[in-house]
Each structure stands twice: as C-alpha cells, then as structure tokens.
Amino acid sequence: MGADKPVALTDEEMLRLLKRAATDLGAQAWVVGGYVRDKLLGRHHPNPDVVVERGDALKLAESFAELAGADPPVTFERFGTAQVTLPGHLVEFVNARAESYAPDSRKPDVRPATLEEDLHRRDFTVNTLLMDFDGQVRDPLGGRRDLDARILRTPTDPLRTFADDPLRMLRGVRFASELGFEPAPDLLPAMKQMKDRLAPPVISAERIAEELRRMLTSPRPRLAIELLDAGELLEIVLPEIAACKGVQQSGYHTHDVFGHTLLTVGKVPPDLVLRVAALFHDAGKPSTATPDGAFTGHEIVGADLARSALERLRFSQKEIETVVKLVRLHLRPVYYSSEWSDGAVRRLARDAGPLLDRLMALARADIAASAYPEPEKLDELQARIEGVLRERPSRLAPLVTGEDVMRVRGIGPGREVGHIKKRLEELVIDGEVPPTREAILDYLAAHPEL
C-alpha cells in the first residue's frame, strides 16, 4: 500500500503523473478509447485506458501507482495489462497487442503488436482516438470524422470485428443508445450473420446482462431495443420480448404488443428495474391471446416470464422480485375507476407496498403508450392513495397476531388462524372495524362465526 492514503486527482493531475511516470521510464504511451471519445464529446469519463507503444505497461503502472500514492497495481501478466485504482478513477494499462480468438471462446490469445495493429483490433473507430499526456489528440483511423458525424463504424470488416469479440455487437447497440450515434450501414447486416455467437460459452450471461442494464438506463432505451431487433439480436438475448412482435391488440391500443412495449419503455423514468418491468409488462400477451382479442391473465404469465428471463441473465434476486411484482400488479392502477371504494384503494397501497411509486409510474407510462381516453384518472387515484396513506391510525398495518387469534378463540395453530387473521385485516381495510388493536380483538370475541 502507498505510504499515504491516495487523494482524489483531477484529470489534469492524473495526466501529469502519467506523463511523469512515462518520462521516467522512457516509455511512449497514449490514452486511448472511451476517455478520449468522451472528452471530445464533452462527457465525463473517469477511467482512462493507457496503451503503451514503447516500453512496459506493467512497469508504467507500477511507477504511476507509486507517484499517485495508490496501492500497487493489479496485474494480468498473460494479457500484459495492469489496473491502478484511485479515488474516483480506475486506470488500466496495456501493451500494444494483437489478439486471435477461438470460435467458441472470448478469451484471446495475445501477442505483441504495433500500435496500428492494436488500434485495428478495437471495437469502433470512435474508440481508436489517441491522446498524449499533454492533451493532444491523434486520429490514425478516422475516428474523429465518425465522432463528428455521430456514426459507429468498425476499424476493420465488422464480421471480423464481431467474430473476434461478439460482445461488441451489444456494445455497439449500447453506444448508440447512450450517445445517440447511428450504426454504419454494414453493422446491422453483420450482426445478423454473427448473432448465434451471442450465447454461452462464447458470451456469459453476466456480460450480456451488463450491456442490457446500460442500454435500459441510457437516454434512449427504446432505440436500444429497436436496434437489437433490427440486428436480430433480440431473439437471442430476449426471446420473450421478440415473441411480442406481430401480436395484435385492439381497444385503446395503437400498436401491436411489441410496439406498445417500446413506447412504454421509453416513457418510464431511467430506473433500471422500472424499465425492465416496462419491458416485460405485456410479455405474457402472446401466449394468452384469444381470438376475441383478450389476454386474460397475461400479467401473471408475464411475471413468470420475467422471472425466468432475469434468472437466466443472472440478475440479483432483489431485482428479480421487484420486477416480478411490478409486472404482476401493473394492471391494477390501469383499471382504476372513481367507483372504487376506499378499501380497494387501501388494498392497492398495501399490495404494492414500497413499490407503489414505481407501480404508478409504470401505469402512467402504460396508459401514455396507448390512446387511453382518461389518463387523468391516475391523478385522482394518486390523490386517493395519498389520502389513505395519511390516515392515522393506519388501516394498512396488521394490528393483531396469530397468537392473539389463538388466545381469543382458544384454538391451536393451523390454517384457520391465518384465515381469521386475514379476514380481520380485510374488515379493517374496508372500514368495517376501527383500526385499533382493542377494537379488533373485541370484534373477534364478539363474532365467533368469523
């Protein structure tokens, strides 16, 4: 560990230390990739990649870490790479290299190469821009031109680029959704040819999921799904969503299920689980469609499909449970009418629990993605929800226990206890029994038929 706790460095301070370390070692090195791209776009990028053209990347990393007062670098000697962690920054060092891949693996065989060879093996030209430690940019492959035109282009034939690393297909979609860039004309046809390589063991579920996360929390999640579909990657990554294409629906809907899903995803806030829930909220419709245009139970089927897909993609259990609950409940606010009793409003608030705000946001997006004639009804529902949540004492919290039921009734443990307790809770929610422990126990004692 460094002698002193490392302090946060500004970009200028970090570049100055990199220059000093390279000068001390007589190394020729450049910042490359996303850091340079984002700097030119006016975006913050905290994690520079340093490619060493002449010298030793591992020694440069060690020298930089020492100058910055950081822990010794984490090294990966097989790949000639090292990482130095600083407060707010992760700096990666790599020797200029060329790579070759077996057809069934993403793990490359690495050999030393020239800087030009190294740049040609990267994913997109906008990520081949070089910057020296004084901030001067060098553009050997036309990346600046593509950056200005907001185009994603591969440095070599996209079939070769994607064959080397199939994850680059998803990265391309993600860059488009994050940056608002357009794929070059040859990218989507290449994706269609290479789509089958987006599967284990070549690409892990975790890596696919990470790209999806970033797509869905980008400023353009709808564009990401559209590009996945256009490149025929959606059927590989999310077949449950691809199945929604062409499933017609009537009533207030203006699009098929897939088109409606895209609109809904685009209308929810940039919250990951909320956007995933929007993506799956109607995923149960293809398998529940009937000739008369009904989709009975699609929210239950969709919740099951969401669980299966997110488990396949290794989402966390907490994320999965949240999405599943939102999908399962998504119709409840949509079906609201002024005729609902206060008890019905309380049940919605109780059943949604801490997900209530997200559920309402999903319902608003669902309605906004159709031609529904009364979207303002959700404002009325929101006001009524806020009213029942302000009630004191609250009618939503259980006030008696199973032990209370057994004591008053003189019965032992069993299913009857649960049934009685639940019935009492429903009577309180409906306003038929005052929301106090004493009143509930008195009611229980006075109504043996309960």
Image (spheres, rainbow, N blue to C red):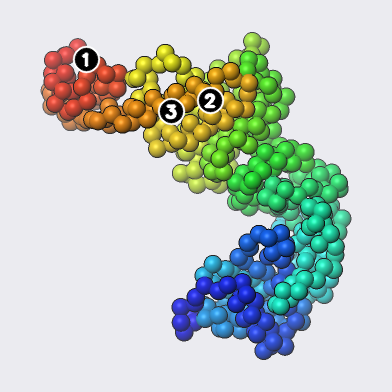
Image coordinates for residue 314, horizontal then vertical, percent = 55, 47
**Residue indicated by mark 2:** 299
Image coordinates for residue 313, horizontal then vertical, percent = 59, 45
What numbered label is drawn on residue 13?
A: none
Residue placed most toward the observer, 97 or 23: 23
**Residue 50 visible, this angle:** yes
Nearest to viewer (mark 3 / mark 1):
3
Q: Residue furthest top?
A: 292
Mark 3 packing: few (<14 Cα in 10 Å), some, or many (20+)?
some
Q: Earlier in the sequence, mark 3 or mark 1?
A: 3
**Marks 2/3: CA distance?**
22 Å
**Residue 243 visible, this angle:** no
Residue placed most toward the observer, 127 or 417: 127
Taking the spot 48% from the left edge, 80% from the top edge, the residue there is: 1
Q: Is residue 309 above or below residue 132?
A: above
Q: Earlier in the sequence, mark 2 or mark 3?
A: 2
Residue placed most toward the observer, 108 or 248: 248
